[in-house]
Image (cartoon, rainbow, N blue to C red):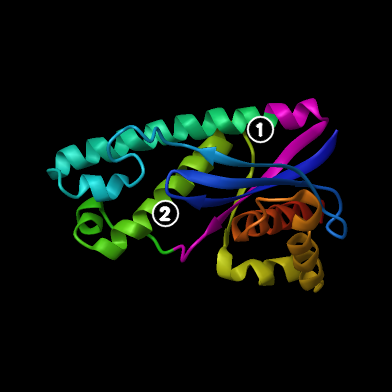
Amino acid sequence: MKECAIGIRVHSGWGALVAIAGDAGAPEVIERRRVEIIDRKKPGAMQPYHFAKDLPLGEAEKFIAGSAASATRLASEAMREVCDKLRAHHYNLVAAAILLSSGRPLPELEKILAAHPMIHTAEGEFFRQAFRDACASLKIPVTGIRERDLDEHAKSALRGDGGLLKKKIAGMGKTLGPPWTTDQKAAALAAAIALAARHK
C-alpha cells in the first residue's frame, strides 16, 4: 500500500480535509472533503462557548463536555470513513496535520467565558481537539502546524524547496476543479509537509 497523509483546516463545526500521496516533488491529491462534526440543529453546537457564557458555570462545564463528546464522535466517524475509503484505494494513512492559530494555552473555563476574544480562541481549539482525538482513536500520528509557520515547515521538510511545493499545490485547482480555496491549499500543504517529514 502507498503511504498518504491528511491535512485539516478547521472552522466552527467543520474542517476542510485534503489527503496527499506521492513524493513531495510531485504531490497528488487523493481525497478532499468537508467534514461536518456538529449537529447544526442542536442549539449552541456551532459556537459552544458563546452558548455556554450565558449559563451558570456548572451547567456551562457540562454543556462544553457534552458538546466535545458529540463533536469527537462525529469526527471519529468521519475519519474512519476517510481511512476506509483510502484503504479501499490501496492507501495507508500514516500521518495527519492540523492547522493551528496562535497555539496559546487557554485559561480555566470561567476566565474564557468572561472574555469575548478568548471565547473565539477557545472555540477554534475546541474543534481542533475533536479532530485530534478522532485521529488518536484511530492511531494516526497528529502534528499541529501554526498556519503562519507553513512556509517555514515546507522549507524544512523539503530542504529549502518549500516555495516550489506551495506553487504546485496552489496550481492544482486548475485540474482538480472547485473547491480549491485557501482552506484546501493550506490543508494540502500541511498534509504534504507531514508526509515529507514521515519519509525523511
Q: Is 132 colored magenta in this rendering? A: no
Q: Quadrant of residue 55?
A: top left
Q: Amino acid at mark 1?
A: Val
* Residue of label 1: 82
Give the label on residue 40, or none.
Answer: none
Q: Quarter of the image containing the N terminus?
A: top right
* Residue of label 2: 124
Question: Residue at horizontal 68%, vertical 71%?
Answer: 151
Question: Residue at horizontal 79%, vertical 57%?
Answer: 174
Question: Residue at horizontal 31%, vertical 32%?
Answer: 42
| Residue density around tag 1, few if under 14, some if 14–19, many if 20 or more, within 10 Å | many
Q: Are marks 1 and 2 in contact (CB under 8 Å)?
A: no
x, y percent for residue 26: 87, 56
x, y percent for residue 70: 39, 31
Measure the alpha-carbon separation of dots 1 and 2: 22 Å
Q: Is 90 colored magenta in this rendering? A: yes
